[in-house]
Each structure stands twice: as structure tokens, then as C-alpha cells.
Amino acid sequence: MIAIGTREQGARTRRRLEHNQDFFYKSEWMAGSEDPDVSPTIFLIEQEPNVTLGAHFHKENQFQLFVHGTGRIGNHPISPGTIHYAGAHTGYGPLVAGSEGLHYFTIRPKLETGAYFLPAKEHMRPGPKRGGNAGPVEMLPAETLARTCTTTRDDLLAMTPDGLGVTAFTVAPDDIVAYQPSPAAEGVFIVVLNGELAFEDKVLGRWESMFVQRTDSFPSLRAAQSGAQIVCLSVPPKDPRYL
């Protein structure tokens, strides 16, 4: 399946949430179904200034793409363009927002709601723990991107045998994205960081996205006249010990 995440859907679903007397905004940019095999989801969290979200884990593999503000995950500093990966049942955090707040997309190939705050020993299952950061990707000004003459590629996280990888592209206007997904991956998310990306009869703008399942042919993607900065997030299957 190919799923699309849009700004319009994010704006329509934005809502305020409370957690431990702190407030967040959440908006669903790509809404997953209840399908247990594939239900890609992308949601934006707007964490308010100086708010801390405690260390926790999830039962699905996920990426997080940070797009505004600064802060840290545990002891690791984060800034716009930082990408974080956490495998299933891998604890991470706390997520600490700085004085500007911290906005980030959470990206999963399968729908999952909620989180398990550590220690949560009754929910944490034994198995491999996997996580880390990539980037940050430098966001180019629009005028610089539109004048780009050559498409460049940066493998921020080289593809692993099981299909975990992060690749950033700066795509010159009207140029094609040359990306070959890993056949081992569960699928790949493509997120537009700047500019516009054309796909069939659609045009994806800043922060909009698509998910291509491994059973689908990778589509032809072309930068618009604006050029495009994109990141391809290849998600491995969940480890069999967690199935």
C-alpha cells in the first residue's frame, strides 16, 4: 500500500492533550487503520517549553523527526533535522524540551496508541534493544533550494541487512529521486523537509509524507520547480521475539 500524510489532515485533527499536568498538542498527519499487518501512522507532537516527557518505550518500531526547537533525548542534544530511531521494546528518554518547545513527528509502520513509562517491567519483553540518532539534516532556505543544480544524497544511517536506514536527498528542480528500497524492510517513509515533491497527480509540500510498503513498487518521485529536500526512513520488521 501507498499511504499519504497531509498538512490538511494534520490541521483538522490537532488537539490539546494533558499528561502529568503538562500540555501537548497532537495532530494526525497520516492516520493508520486497525490493520494488524500494516497501518502506517505519522503524528506531530508539539511539546511546550521546558516540559519533560519521561523515559518510556513502545511495542512497535518507530522513527521520530524533530522539526522545531531544541532539547535532548536522555543526554543527547536534539535540534531541527535530528532523526531518532527506537526499536520495539527499547526504552528512550526523557524527552526534554528547551525554551522554544520541541515539535516532532512520530512515525510508525503500525498503529500503536499510548506509551509504557519506565520501568514498566510487566510490559517490557526480553529481546534486542536498538536505538540511536542521525543528522541533523540542514534545512535549506527556499531560494537556495530552488537554485540547486545537482541532486545530492547523504546516507545518514547506512542500510542494515534487515532494512534499517536513513537517507536524505536534496533534489534539484524537476529531477528524479533515485532511491532503491531494501527488500528486507517493512516499508519506507518519505518525508518532505522543504520544497515540493510530485507523485502521480499529487504534490507533497513541507512536512507532508508518504509510506511505501515493501510489497509495492517504489513510485517515480520528482521534485517540483521549487526543488525538494526529503528524507527516506526505512523501517525494519519487528524482531520475531516481539511478535
Image (spheres, helix red, strand yellow):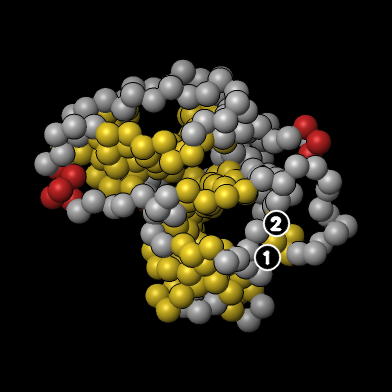
Q: Residue at x 31, y 52 (%)?
A: 138
Q: Residue at x 26, y 25 (%)?
A: 176
Question: Which mark identifies residue 91?
Answer: 2
> Please, is residue 182 above or below residue 81 in the view?
above
Q: Is residue 179 left or right of residue 46?
A: left
Count all numbered tags in the image, as a single digit.
2
Q: Residue at x 41, y 62 (%)?
A: 79
Residue 165: horizontal and vertical position, in percent? 51, 35
Q: Nearer the viewer, residue 104 or 30?
A: 104
Q: Are marks 2 and 1 in contact (CB under 8 Å)?
A: yes
> Please, is residue 219 above or below residue 17 in the view?
above
Q: Is residue 193 visible?
A: yes
Q: Quadrant of the C terminus?
A: top right
Q: Is residue 214 left or right of residue 237?
A: left
Question: Which mark identifies residue 2?
Answer: none
Q: Is residue 9 visible?
A: no
Q: Amino acid at mark 2?
A: Gly
Residue bearing mark 1: 55
Q: Residue at x 61, y 33 (%)?
A: 236
Residue 166: horizontal and vertical position, in percent? 47, 38
Q: Tag 2, which secondary structure? A: loop
First along the sequence among labels 2 and 1: 1
Q: Nearer the viewer, residue 92 or 227?
A: 92
Residue 15: horizontal and vertical position, in percent? 51, 66
Q: Nearer the viewer, residue 137 or 18?
A: 137
> Please, is residue 52 above or below residue 208 in the view?
below
Q: Tag 1, which secondary structure? A: loop
